[in-house]
Amino acid sequence: MKLAKRMGNLGTESAFEVLARAKALEAQGKHIIHLQIGEPDFDTPKNIVEAGANALRGGHTHYTPSAGMINFREVIAKDVSDSRGVSYKAENVVVCPGAKPIMFYVILALVDEGDEVIYPNPGFPIYESMIRFVGGKPVPARLPEEHDFRLDVDGLIKSLSPKTKLIILNSPGNPTGGILEKSDVERIAQAVKKYPDCWVLSDEIYRKIIYTPTELPSIVSEPGMVDRTIILDGFSKTWAMTGWRLGYGVMPEPLAPHIARLQTNSASCTAGFTQVAGIEAMTGDQTSVKNMVAEFRRRRDAIVAGLNTIKGVHCRAPKGAFYVFPNITGTGRKSKELEGLLLNEAGVACLSGTSFGEFGEGYLRFSYANSLENIKIAIERMRTVLGAA
């Protein structure tokens, strides 16, 4: 089969490849602990499920506007305005079936062949995949372990040039759990202003899953950045709604119709009943979110402590999201080799750090979106295979 050349530039998400290998081993009778997939193991809160079910019964089974239902977009606009200290309205919002389409649409709309895009590395693999797919030039920005995987702002600023069309930020970050501090976003904003054609895509999908007492800064809150920034967010992580496929982008009003037009040409629209459920998620009782984050904190503490008891492994405590990114250089093994060893010998599914870019070598990513009991079993199995520290 002869495919279009552009398909050679399209990457993938390794979590689903490891999941397939893990499922194959399970089919052979092997017990696997899944720490590879970035999906909360909690059910969607009952009030949200009920809102979605009532919407189905009430006839929300038809097309909706490509940009999303106006009442839902108003709710999103108010939430983002209130939490970031800016002013948005429904016309700034485009709702999508998941947050990932915003990544696709923004890069398709803004990046021409040869344009440079700065993105976090190690980072979510779809960033680099999509940059390459449209013919852009990926420019990696490192996240040094010695700075708790905060973005190397000095390096990012040095990478800026007149060719830079887009900067992608992700805080809290996947796969490291690192976060940007107020001084970081201030410096990035000042640097971006020197390049009038440069935009910022701020991926804030893990914004509510943080373990620090302070409010998480967003670059859109910096002076002059509301007209240069697209916020990407969604419902999969905070409200355990991965299968509902519901996300959104908030952006300058002149850009929104173009992003909506890409949606019209691809997915048409987002299901109406999921949008009604999204309204309930944002405006209803938030107790389940607080409980989930508290449980993630307990799991984080357990997996960090456990990994640090394994020979050749050193793990820092992430400040957000639900991933740990331990340094495994002390084992003397490459990341991909250790990923396979742990799956096949320990029955623990995780991801090689290289799944998130070249600077991920020497690391593994574990998702602690699994029970405390399973995390403890996984640690014991890994200690059996690799030895105690």
Image (spheres, rainbow, N blue to C red):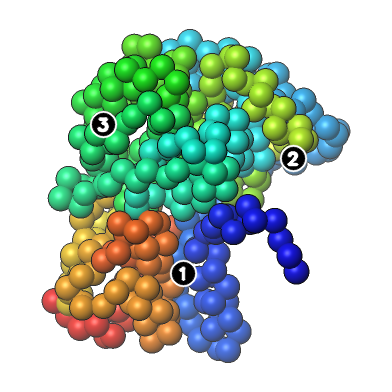
Q: Measure the C-alpha gap from mark 2 to mark 1.
A: 31 Å
Total numbered circles: 3
Name the mark on residue 25. Answer: none
Residue at position x 28%, y 85% in the image: 385
Say which amino acid is labelled 1.
His
Q: Nearer the viewer, residue 290 or 194?
A: 194
The quadrant of the image that shows the C terminus is bottom left
Determine which residue is flagged by label 2.
Answer: 267
Look at 58% across and 81% down and name the residue there.
24
Q: Residue drawn at (34%, 59%), measured in percent from left and top?
A: 358
Residue 314 lies, with reference to residue 255, above or below; the image says below
113 left or right, relative to 35: right
Residue 157 numbered tag? 3
In front here: 185 or 69? 185
Picture quadrant where residue 347 is located: bottom left
Q: Residues within 10 Å of mark 1 (few under 14, many from 20)?
A: many
Looking at the rendered structure, the kind of residue marked 2 is Ala
Q: Which residue is mark 1?
A: 34
**Residue 2 is drawn in which quadrant?**
bottom right
Eyeballing the image, is 382 above or below 318? below
Whole-percent x, y for residue 236 in the image: 55, 44
Mark 2 vs mark 1: give the one in front. Answer: 2
**Mark 2 or mark 1: whose residue is earlier in sequence:** 1
Q: Residues within 10 Å of mark 3 (few under 14, many from 20)?
A: some
| Residue type at numbered disc 3 | Ile
| Residue 135, horizontal then vertical, whole percent | 54, 44
The front one of 138 and 276 is: 138
| 269, above or below 199, in the image | below
Which quarter of the figure has residue 282? top right
Decide if residue 251 is in sight here.
yes
